[in-house]
Every structure is written in structure tokens, then in C-alpha cells.
Image (cartoon, helix red, strand yellow):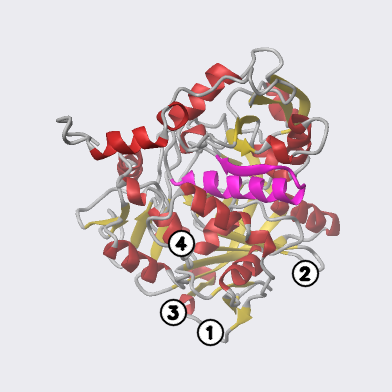
């Protein structure tokens, strides 16, 4: 496993694999960069390194769509695989399997270093000006310029025992103020509630452009009380190097390109949003969110700002499709359910989980109910409202097979199981106003497996080459294929 330890090493690796494109032509931070990244996403193009941004000195650069899907089918998930230290041709099932083991590794705490390259420039007091960073205005209709789209927000509990490295969108408000999502049910919101109860503003640090595994794991559903930095360390078998902040009692990854420090106000609110989100739709009108007051900015020489431009899939949120599927697989295995594979199609915007099961290994009474209980009593389940269950002989990544199984094996009544309202993520476009407010909605499982009580001779047999033709005939036809005059294989 190759542990890539900073963003520039990551970019160099992408260059070698032809997975990044450098744009030296001047581009406007105002919508042009966003439009370019949207087209790149839609065409499954490479990551994009912008070196010439209008109104900003050339020392500033932007790396766009760092973990998006790639057009070479053998490297579709190449940028994600490289981020995780895997080979660029790793497929979705291999990556999901790798991610499903994250919780099984021994946690390794970060290693504190005295200084780091992210301290090459330290801006305090009157020198703080967020507008000197080329923060893009991505979608026409966004509530503002978003600096936090592929990053890590670091916060902690009042007693300091739980440090959270999470990904929550962050918007520019003015030269020294940001605002961002502080959702009560997410870890940052739970920590914020503690600081509010103590009547103290909450310290924060936003780190941008770290080693590539950090934002990826920051976006995952790590259980409350476990620091994502410890998970990264455990995954690679060595502690992440961190350095002390300048103005707050937090430590940040030494590999960062940019660090923004300050306090989240417990009293002051700012308008945040709308924003074009991973669902492929704009969120509704702006809401009031806490103000993030900046007390320091540090950055490397010639810094690189990492940016993703969410929208209709497929885009960089393909990484969350894989990580969420990995989380789900880990949960099912922990519950001793016979789930063999999990997959979330990149185009599903995290809303649909496809799983395969070996029903012969199940010893309980109601497999579908047990699947529902396992996933929808866990935080992971809040993002997954729909599940398709397939037999073990179906490839969950083959959409032709999935649609065939869904259409022919899912009974319209007994194969469709709707479950009572449970916690859901409020960004789902189909939710009503009341459901968004209550953060609850029904969930559904489509059982595309034949019932256990069917006799074996009643279960329909697939009409495919492997099932209904003897092996010797299959081999004979394969050997004579070219003699038949066929040019395709």
C-alpha cells in the first residue's frame, strides 16, 4: 500500500497516471471554474489543476474534482484508489471491501511535530483577509463563494476528549468571517451544543489540501467519539503528522496547504446557502447558521485550494458512494448477516444501496427485517433510504443484471417492504417540508430474491450460457468462435 503524504505528491501521481489536466489559460473564479468542473464531471474527465485565476497572483492554484470518476473504465475510481494507497485500476468492489475494514484497524493517534510547511505564511490580525484566497463562486444561485467543498473541519468537545475531523460545507461571509452547516445531529453540531451550554465559542480549524486520504475519511461515517485522524493513522499503520494551531488549542495535519483558524460563535448567525448539492439539486433558500470568526490563516508557499463542484451525479461524491457502501458492509458483517457485497451506484446520489446475500447462511426468521434494523438504527442509514436485495449470483455493479432482477424477481406486494419513518438526511429532494423539519421519513427495501419456502424445482432457472449449455459445448464454441467468422468477442 502506497501512503501518499501530501497533496503535491498526489498530483504528481495523478500526472503519471494521466488522471489530471493542467489549465494555464486564465479562468474566472466567478462561475467559469464551476462550469468547467461540471463539464469535466459529466464527461468523466480528469482532475483539473488551474494555475491562472483571474484577479489573483499566479502563486495561487486550484485543484478541482480531486476524487471524481475517470473516463478510462479501468481507472474509473483511480483518484479514489490512489488516495487510499491502492492501485489506480482498483474496482468499486475492491475499494468498498477495503473501506469496510476501516473500523477494524487499530487506531493510531496523530504524531505532533514542531513545525510544518503549512506555517510558511502566517497571517494574523489586520493581515487576515479571506478574499485574498481565490474562493470560487461555483453555481449560479449559490448563497456565496464556498471555500469548504473538499476539506476537513476540526473541532473538539469541551473536555477535549473527542476531536472530530469532519466535512461540512463552508461559505465565505466577509474578509474575516465564514459560515457553515452546524447540524445538531452531526458530530460538529453535538460538540457545538456542549460549547453553547458552557457559554463559550467553539474553536475550529479548517484544513484544505491535506494528504488525500484525510478529506476522504473525514467525509465518512466514523462513530461518535472516534477521531478520523486516528482512523487514518490506523489505516496506514503510522500516525498522521500534526502541528499546533497559532490561535486556538487544536492540532492540524502538517500536510495542509491552507489552514484557517478561529471560533464558531454561539450567538452570532449568518445567512448560509443555497448551494448546489450532491443530490443534483439546489438546496432551498438560505438559512441562519453560526458565524465562524477567523483569527489566523496559515498556508504554504504557492498554495493549492482543493475544490469540488457538486451537482447531478457523477462527480466527486462518487467517493462517498464507495465509503458509505463500505460502512454498510461493515455493519452487516458486525451483525452477522449474510451480506456478501454492497454497492451504491454513483448516479444514485447516495439514495440507493444494492446488496447481495447468501440466504442459505441465514438462520433467522426475517432477513429483510434484520437488514432494515441493522442499517436504519445506525447513523449510516440516515443517508440511505432505499435498498435492493439480490441473490448471491448477481453482480451488484452490473446495472443490466440489477434491473433484470428487480423487474423479474421482486414481487410488487410481498417483495416491497416499507418501514416506518426513521431518521433521514434532510437534503433528499422528495421530502416534504414537514419531513425535512422533523428529519424523519419512511424507508423501503425491494426483495429481489426468491422465497426460501419455494421448492427447488419451482425456482426458475436462468437462461444463460453458463446454466443451460454443457461445459464442453461452451468450450467448443469458444474455441471455434473465429472460424464462425465473428469479429467480436
Residue for point 47% across, 59% down: 130
Instruction: Out of 322 and 434, give the one closest to the viewer.
Output: 322
Pointer 1 residue? 115
Pointer 2 residue? 160
Pointer 4 residue? 83
Give the main secondary structure of the magenta stretch. Answer: helix
Cα separation between marks 3 and 2:
28 Å
Residue for point 76% across, 47% down: 336
Instruction: For marks 1 and 3, give the one nearer the viewer.
Output: 1
Do labels 3 and 2 touch, CB within 8 Å? no
Instruction: For marks 3 and 2, give the one nearer the viewer.
Output: 2
* Mark 1 residue crowding within 10 angstroms, few (<14) / some (14–19) / many (20+): some
Q: Quadrant of the C terminus?
A: top left
Q: Is residue 412 above or below residue 79?
A: above
Question: x and y percent of residue 112 in the render?
Answer: 62, 82
Of marks 1 and 2, which one's residue comes earlier in the chain?
1
Q: Secondary structure at mark 2?
A: loop
Question: x and y percent of residue 420 in the render?
Answer: 79, 24
* Mark 4 residue crowding within 10 angstroms, few (<14) / some (14–19) / many (20+): many
Residue 333 highlighted magenta (yes or no): yes
Bounds of the magenta span? 316-343
* Mark 2 residue crowding within 10 angstroms, few (<14) / some (14–19) / many (20+): few
Of marks 1 and 4, which one's residue comes earlier in the chain?
4
Cα separation between marks 3 and 4:
25 Å
Q: Secondary structure at mark 4?
A: helix
Of marks 1 and 3, which one's residue comes earlier in the chain?
1
Amino acid at each position: 500500500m502506497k501512503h501518499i503524504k501530501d497533496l503535491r505528491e498526489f498530483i504528481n501521481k495523478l500526472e503519471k497516471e494521466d488522471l489530471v489536466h493542467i489549465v494555464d489559460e486564465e479562468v474566472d473564479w466567478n462561475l467559469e471554474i464551476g462550469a468547467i468542473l461540471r463539464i469535466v464531471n459529466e464527461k468523466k474527465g480528469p482532475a483539473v489543476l488551474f494555475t491562472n485565476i483571474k484577479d489573483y497572483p499566479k502563486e495561487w492554484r486550484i485543484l478541482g474534482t480531486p476524487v471524481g470518476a475517470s473516463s478510462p473504465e479501468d481507472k474509473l475510481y483511480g483518484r479514489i484508489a490512489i488516495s487510499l494507497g491502492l492501485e489506480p485500476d482498483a474496482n468499486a468492489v475492491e475499494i468498498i471491501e477495503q473501506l469496510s475494514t476501516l473500523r477494524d484497524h487499530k487506531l493510531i493517534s496523530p504524531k505532533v511535530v514542531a513545525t510544518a510547511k503549512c506555517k510558511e505564511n502566517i497571517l494574523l490580525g489586520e493581515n487576515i483577509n479571506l478574499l485574498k484566497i481565490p474562493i470560487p463562486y461555483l453555481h449560479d444561485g449559490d448563497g456565496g463563494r464556498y471555500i469548504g467543498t473538499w476539506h476537513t473541519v476540526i473541532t473538539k468537545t469541551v473536555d477535549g476528549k473527542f476531536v472530530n475531523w469532519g466535512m461540512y460545507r463552508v461559505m465565505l461571509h466577509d474578509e474575516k468571517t465564514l459560515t457553515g452547516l452546524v447540524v445538531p445531529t452531526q458530530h460538529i453540531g453535538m460538540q457545538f451544543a456542549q460549547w453553547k451550554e458552557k457559554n463559550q465559542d467553539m474553536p475550529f480549524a479548517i484544513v484544505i489540501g491535506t494528504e488525500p486520504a484525510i478529506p476522504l475519511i473525514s467525509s465518512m461515517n466514523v462513530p461518535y467519539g472516534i477521531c478520523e485522524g486516528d482512523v487514518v493513522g490506523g489505516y496506514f499503520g503510522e500516525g498522521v503528522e500534526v502541528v499546533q494551531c497559532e490561535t486556538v488549542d487544536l492540532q492540524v495535519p502538517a500536510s495542509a496547504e491552507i489552514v484557517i483558524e478561529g471560533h464558531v460563535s454561539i450567538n452570532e448567525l449568518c445567512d448560509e446557502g443555497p448551494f448546489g448539492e450532491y443530490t443534483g439539486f439546489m438546496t432551498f433558500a438560505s438559512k441562519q447558521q453560526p458565524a465562524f470568526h477567523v483569527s489566523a490563516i496559515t498556508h504554504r508557499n504557492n498554495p493549492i485550494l482543493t475544490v469540488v463542484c457538486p451537482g447531478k451525479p457523477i462527480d466527486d461524491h462518487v467517493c462517498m458512494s464507495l465509503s458509505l457502501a463500505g460502512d454498510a458492509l461493515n455493519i452487516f458483517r458486525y451483525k452477522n448477516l449474510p451480506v456478501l457485497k454492497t454497492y451504491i451506484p454513483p448516479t444514485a446520489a447516495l439514495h440507493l444501496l444494492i446488496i447481495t446475500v447468501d440466504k442459505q447462511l441465514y438462520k433467522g426468521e426475517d432477513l429483510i427485517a434484520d437488514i432494515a434494523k441493522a442499517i436504519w438504527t445506525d447513523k449510516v442509514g440516515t443517508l440511505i433510504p432505499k435498498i435492493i436485495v439480490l441473490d448471491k449470483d448477481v453482480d451488484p455493479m452490473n446495472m443490466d443484471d440489477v434491473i433484470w432482477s428487480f423487474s423479474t424477481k421482486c414481487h410488487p406486494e410481498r417483495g416491497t417492504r416499507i418501514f416506518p419513518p426513521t431518521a433521514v438526511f434532510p437534503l433528499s429532494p422528495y421530502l416534504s417540508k414537514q419531513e425535512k423539519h422533523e428529519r424523519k421519513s419512511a424507508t423501503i427495501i425491494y426483495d429481489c430474491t426468491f422465497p426460501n419456502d419455494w421448492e427447488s424445482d419451482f425456482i426458475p432457472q436462468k437462461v444463460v450460457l453458463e446454466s443451460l449449455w454443457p461445459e464442453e459445448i461452451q468450450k467448443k464454441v469458444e474455441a471455434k468462435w473465429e472460424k464462425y467468422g465473428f469479429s467480436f468477442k
